[in-house]
Amino acid sequence: MIYVTAEQMRQIDHYTINEIGIPSIVLMENAKAQISKHILDKNFDKAYVFCSVGNNGGDGLAVARDIYNAEKFVKVYVIGKIEKASTDFKINYDILKKLDVEIEFVDENTKFDITENDLIVDSIFGTGLKRDIEGIYKDVIDMINDTQAFVVSVDMPSGLDSDENKIHNVAVKADLLVTLQLPKKSLQDYEGDYVVEPIGIPEKSIKHVLNNAS
């Protein structure tokens, strides 16, 4: 099995989008479908999606749409400012708003009522995280880890480094990790359950980056 670094995955994504011509929003839709199939077969009362405003968060928003379309309860908690959101995040955010999906921006006064019968989607941080998690982000991850809900992480458990088996101060304890297209290097030592799901990145993109790696 091939394991890639965060930088290699970034280059593979870049080549796919800019050289092959597959739009990033298409890859996000593909990711959504692969993540959702591991969620919609679960029995849960309510689903709560936790996301920041980057593309990992955009994946989570897209998954929230699938949960909504399956006529299950879903609420989204956003950590961060919408003004700093990525383009694909904003696309999915606007869709959820038009569907009247409940979205709450997290601050120090936010209250959570999550039970052991619920499901959490962790799409806060992806492969690009290289700094310690502090403040409201740490508080949310601590809260997630304190619940008894079933937790599904998108691409990486938020807080776990993609390249090394180390935690950036705190990390989500996922019951299931759905990592996208290729497993990340640190997952060689990962002790939790994870699956690798393709999102439509051509083999040409992967070979182009890995064959030219120094």
Image: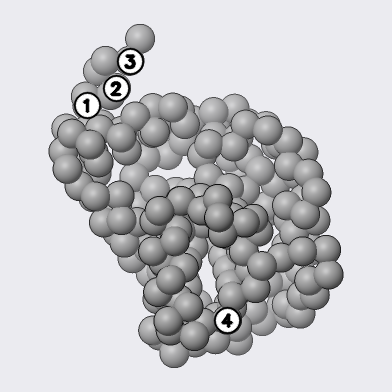
Q: Position of residue 52 (x, y in %)?
A: 59, 55
Q: Residue furthest bottom?
A: 71
Q: Are marks 2 and 1 in contact (CB under 8 Å)?
A: yes
Q: Are marks 3 and 2 in contact (CB under 8 Å)?
A: yes
Please name the residue that numbered disc 4 is placed on: 102
Q: Nearer the viewer, mark 4 or mark 3?
A: 4
Q: Quarter holding the N terminus?
A: top left
Instruction: Indicate the amino acid at tag 3.
Output: Ala
Image side of residue 160 versus residue 148, left or right: left
Which residue is drawn at the image coordinates 41% and 66% (left, top)?
A: 92
Please name the residue that numbered disc 2 is placed on: 210
Q: How is the image coloured?
A: one colour
| 86 vs 203: above or below | below
Q: N-terminal of the two: label 4 or label 3? A: 4
Instruction: Indicate the amino acid at tag 1.
Output: Lys
- Comparing 180 with 11, the one in front is 11
Q: Residues within 10 Å of mark 1 (few under 14, many from 20)?
A: few
Q: N-terminal of the two: label 1 or label 3? A: 1
Instruction: Indicate the amino acid at tag 4.
Output: Glu
* Secondary structure beneath label 4: strand
Mark carried by residue 213: 3
Mark yes or no: residue 28 visible: yes
Mark carried by residue 207: 1
Mark carried by residue 138: none
Q: Quarter holding the C terminus?
A: top left
CA–CA distance in space, label 1 to label 4: 41 Å
- Residue 147, image quadrant: bottom right
Image side of residue 6 versus residue 46, left or right: left
* Secondary structure beneath label 2: helix
